Image: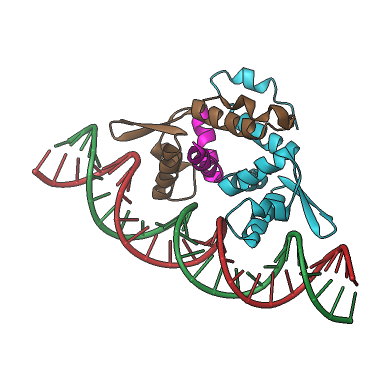
Chain colours: A cyan, B brown, C green, D red
Amino acid sequence: MEQAITRTLHALSDPTRRAILQMLNERDMTAGEIAARFAISAPSVSHHLSVLKAADLVTAERHGQHMIYRLNATVLQEVLSLVMDLFKVGADADTQRKEGGHA
Amino acid sequence: MEQAITRTLHALSDPTRRAILQMLNERDMTAGEIAARFAISAPSVSHHLSVLKAADLVTAERHGQHMIYRLNATVLQEVLSLVMDLFKVGADADTQRKEGGHA
DNA sequence: AGAGTATTTAGAAGATTGGCTAACTATCTA
DNA sequence: TAGATAGTTAGCCAATCTTCTAAATACTCT
């Protein structure tokens, strides 16, 4: 669980991966469509996608020749909420906790 | 700004650094007090503190022989909010980009 | 079955990270 | 001024990260 947070935050700490997540937030995309929007090679993008998948931030589904990637918005939201909760950020800790019961 | 998010998320992606932030969320502490709670060496803790300081997640103030570290809760909250906003998780992608104005 | 397209896996180079010990700087106290 | 204490900086090493090219796998179409 602690491990999961580490994996998720690490996945989010890379600008390319965040850009991928933002693209997927607009719409589902194939690996090729995603790769086409970056200067780095397709295998590198594929690797980033596997990191995001390992962190459960995206899901992948094969459609014929294509792999369709989809944002796992729930997990992203949960982890960020969890981190916020973890630190009870903000001077007013009780304001933070009211919304806390999510998972 | 994009760079700042990367630095902050990277700083948060290490379990030791998150533990330090949680400790500082309870109360301000000296470098020595923090170091004493970990199995790793004092120089290693000092390095983690410098990473957190570079990410503006903590501030440091000298008090005589001691360095007192303090959580910068505002920055932590802002960055996490920013990331949530960035992906506007769970919401319609339509509203997503409009609310960019935060910090 | 064979050719072509989409994507991943393998293996390697180069950069970065996180840990260590040793040495340095800064401050306090005698 | 010298010695002790607190913390950081420097230099090193092993592990991990990001990227690449080349090769393998998965699927479609003829």
> Considering only vertical position in the picture, is A39 above or below B80?
below
| Magenta stretch in the rendered image | B1-25
* Horizontal side, residue C22 vs residue A84: left or right: left
For the point 79% across and 57% down, the residue is A66
Q: Is residue B14 magenta?
A: yes
Q: Does residue A14 appear in the picture of this structure?
A: no
> Which of the 4 quarters of the picture holds residue C28?
top left
> Considering only vertical position in the picture, is B26 above or below D13?
above
* Horizontal side, residue C15 vs residue A38: left or right: left
* Horizontal side, residue B48 vs residue A6: left or right: left
Q: Nearer the viewer, residue B57 or C12?
A: C12
Q: Is residue A88 magenta?
A: no
* Horizontal side, residue B11 vs residue A63: left or right: left
For the point 49% across and 31% down, the residue is B24
For the point 44% across and 43% down, the residue is B51
Q: Where does residue B4 sit, x and y in percent of width and height?
A: 48, 38
Q: Where does residue A7 sit, x and y in percent of width and height?
A: 64, 48
Total numbered badges shown on the rendered structure = 0
Q: Does residue A47 appear in the picture of this structure?
A: yes
Q: Where does residue A92 sit, x and y in percent of width and height?
A: 57, 18
Q: What secondary structure characterizes most of the magenta part?
A: helix
Q: Where does residue B36 sit, x and y in percent of width and height?
A: 45, 42
For the point 39% across and 49% down, the residue is B43
Q: Nearer the viewer, residue B86 or C9?
A: B86
Q: Nearer the viewer, residue A16 or A64?
A: A64
